[in-house]
Image (cartoon, rainbow, N blue to C red):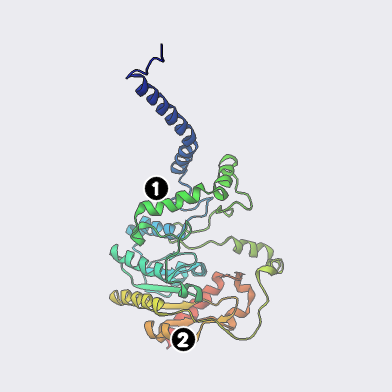
Amino acid sequence: MGNIPETITDAPIRKRAAFLRLVRKSLWFALPFWALMALYVYDDPFMVLRKYDLYDSDVMLNEHHVGWQIYKNHNDSVHFNSFILGNSCTMAFRCGEWEKYLAPGDRAIRLFGNAESMKAIILKLHALESESAEIKNVLLVLDRTSLSHSELLTGPSHILPAAISGCNPFVVQMEFIQAFAMPDFLFPYLKYRITGRVEPGMKRMNPYGRIRDSKNNDAFNPREKMIEQEGEAYWENRKKEFPERVGTVTIAETAIFQKQRRILEEIRKVLRRHDTSVRVLISPDYSQKELHPDDRKILQGIFGKENVYDFSGINEFTEDYHNYYESGHYRPLLGNQLLERVYNTHHSG
C-alpha cells in the first residue's frame, strides 16, 4: 500500500502548533525588551512621563522640559511675568537679582535650553501666549552661536516638550525611549540602578546632586563650591579649560542671515503685542571674540539700540578669568555686574 494521505484535520493542527512555537519563541526573545520598557515607565528616568514637584535627579534632564514644568507647577501661585530666555549662560543670572531691577511684585523664571536656538525661543514665547501669560519683562541672553541657530535641535537633551513645539507627544517620547535603550546610557544606568551610585564617566548622569531651584529654575553650579574650597588653585589646576587668549581683537563671523532675522523680528512682534520691556544681552565670552558689527546693527534695528548690550570682545568683564567656571560659562558674580551695567546705563540714559 502507498503512504496514507494526510487527513484534512492534520495539516491545520500542525500549522497551529508551529505557529504557537513561533509565538512562544518571539515572546521569549521580546521579554528583555518589555522588561526594559517596564523599567523605563516605572523609573521615568528623564522625568518626562509624569508630573513632579522637584526636578532634581541623578540623571541629566532635558532643560526645556524642566523649565516648562516648573513654570506650570508654580505659575498659579507665583504668577510669573518676567522670563530669562536663552542658552546655558543664563545660569549667570539669578531671578532674584534680576527682580531687583524690575517693578515691585514682578516675578521671574528661567526658561532656557542648552545650545538654545532662536526657533526654540520664539516657540516658548508662543507657548506662553497660549497660556495667557503676562509677558512683562524679557531678558534675552545670547551669543553668536545661539544667534546662528535657526532650526530646532533634536535628541533627548534638546527636543522641546510637545506643549511648546506642537509636535506629536509620541514622537517626543520616542526620543527619550531611544536614548534610554542606547547601550552607552542603558548599561551605566542599570549599574547605577543596582548600586545607587553615580560614577565618573556615566553618560547623561548627574554626579552633583541639586543643580537647580525648584521654584524659578535658577542654576546651582557645583563649580561655585569648588571655587570656594580651592580658591586660586581652581584656575591653576584647570588650565586646559582656560586656553590662552590672543589678546588682540578678533571679529566673529556673521551669524544673522535671512532665516535668523525673520525669527528675531517674530520675537519682537510678540514682545510688542505684550508691551514687553526687553533687554538683549550678548554674553562676554571667554574667547573674547567680538560679535560681528553687522549682527549688532541688526539686533539694534529690531529691538532698539537702547535695549541691546554687547559684552563680547575684549573688555573689563572678559579680561578677568576669575569670572568664568570654564571657557564656556561665566559666574553669577559677573552676571550681577552685567545686570547693573544694563539697567543703570538704561536708566541713566
Q: Can see residue 285?
A: yes
Tell me where residue 43 appears, x and y as whole percent: 47, 43
Decide which of 324, 28 is in the foreground and name it. 28
Q: Is residue 269 left or right of residue 1?
A: left
Question: In the image, what residue occupies the spot 37% across and 51% down?
Answer: 170
Tell me the SS state at disc 2: helix
- Which is in the foreground here, disc 1 or disc 2? 2
Q: Is residue 309 above or below residue 23?
A: below
**Residue at point 44%, 53% (across, down):** 175
Q: Would you name the residue on which mark 1 appears?
A: 50
Give neighbour class at mark 2: few <14, some 14-19, many 20+ (Cα, 10 Å): few
Residue 292 in the image: x percent, y percent? 51, 84
Asked whether 133 or 130 is in front, the reply is: 130
Residue 145 in the image: state x and y as whole percent. Answer: 50, 73
Residue drawn at x 31%, y 74% as measured from the top left: 270
Name the quadrant containing residue 232.
bottom right
Q: Residue 294: which numbered mark, if any?
A: 2
- Tag 1: amino acid: Arg
Identify the element where label 1 is drawn.
loop
Neighbour tally class for label 1: few under 14, some 14-19, many 20 plus, Cα within 10 Å: few
In the rendered image, the residue lying farthest to the front is 1
